[in-house]
Image: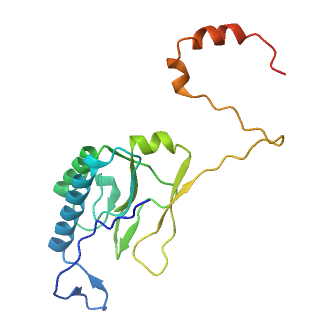
Amino acid sequence: MELANLTPKKSGGSPHQTSNNRKTKPPHEKASEHIVITSNLESIAPNMGEPWVVMGDFNSYLFAHEKQGGGAPNASCMDRFSRCISNCNLVDLGFKGPKFTWKRNNIMERIDRVSGNQVWVSNFSNYSVFTLPSFKSDHNAILLKPTVHSMSSSGEKPFRFQAAWLTHNSFEDLVVCHWNHDTH
C-alpha cells in the first residue's frame, strides 16, 4: 500500500492570519492548492491499473448542494473537480453521517471525500464511508471501513455468486442439470 500526499507544500512565506489567530488561506491560495491537487491526481491516474482509492480534503465540492452559506458556489472549481474525477475514472464512494465535512462560521461544505476507481469498487465492494463528528477541527474526519461478513454458525462460508461463472462454456448446462436436485 502506498500513501501519497497530494497537497502542495508552501515554499516560504507565512500563512494568512485571521483576527482570532486561526491559520487560514486566502481564497486565491485555496483555489491554487485545489488546482495542484487535481493536477497531481490526473498525472497519477493513467498509471493506476490496480485498485486505488483517494480520500481526504480536496478543497472543492462537486455539486452546488454540497455548499451552504457564504457566497455563491464556485462553478469553475466544481467543474475542474468534476472533470478531474471523471478523467481519473474515479467514483464517489458515498458516505453515512453528517452531509458537510467542513464548517467555518455560517459556511458549510463537503470538501472531504473518498473516491475509488472501478477496479477498487469491484474488488472491495463491502465497505462503508463514514463522516465522523469533528473534534478540535473545522473538518470532520472520514473513515473508510471494510464490512466483514461473518461465517455461518456451522463455520461454512456463505454462498457467493461470481459473475465470471457466466462466461464458462458449460455454466448454463450445469445450472439446468442441478437446479432441481436436493443439496442437503
Residue 62 visible, this angle = yes
* Residue 164 position in % (x across, y down): 51, 25
Q: Quadrant of the C terminus?
A: top right
* Residue 124 position in % (x across, y down): 51, 45
Give 183 or 80, whichever is nearer the viewer.
183
Give 103 or 132, whichever is nearer the viewer.
132
Residue 62, above or below 125:
below
| Left/right of residue 37 with respect to residue 141 in the rendered view | left
Residue at 18% x, 67% y is: 31
* Residue 86 position in % (x across, y down): 27, 44
| Quadrant of the image occupied by residue 39 | bottom left
Residue 128, above or below 112:
above
* Residue 173 position in % (x across, y down): 61, 8
Question: How many numbered markers are drawn?
Answer: 0
Residue at 21% x, 54% y is: 43
| Left/right of residue 26 with respect to residue 108 in the rendered view | left
Q: Quadrant of the N terminus?
A: bottom left
Residue at 64% x, 32% y is: 160
Residue at 46% x, 81% y is: 136
Query: In the rendered view, how is the structure colored?
Result: rainbow
| Left/right of residue 44 with respect to residue 169 in the rendered view | left
| Quadrant of the image occupied by residue 38 | bottom left
Give 4 or 100, whichever is nearer the viewer.
4
Residue 74 visible, this angle = no
| Quadrant of the image occupied by residue 101 | bottom left
Residue 87, above or below 44:
above
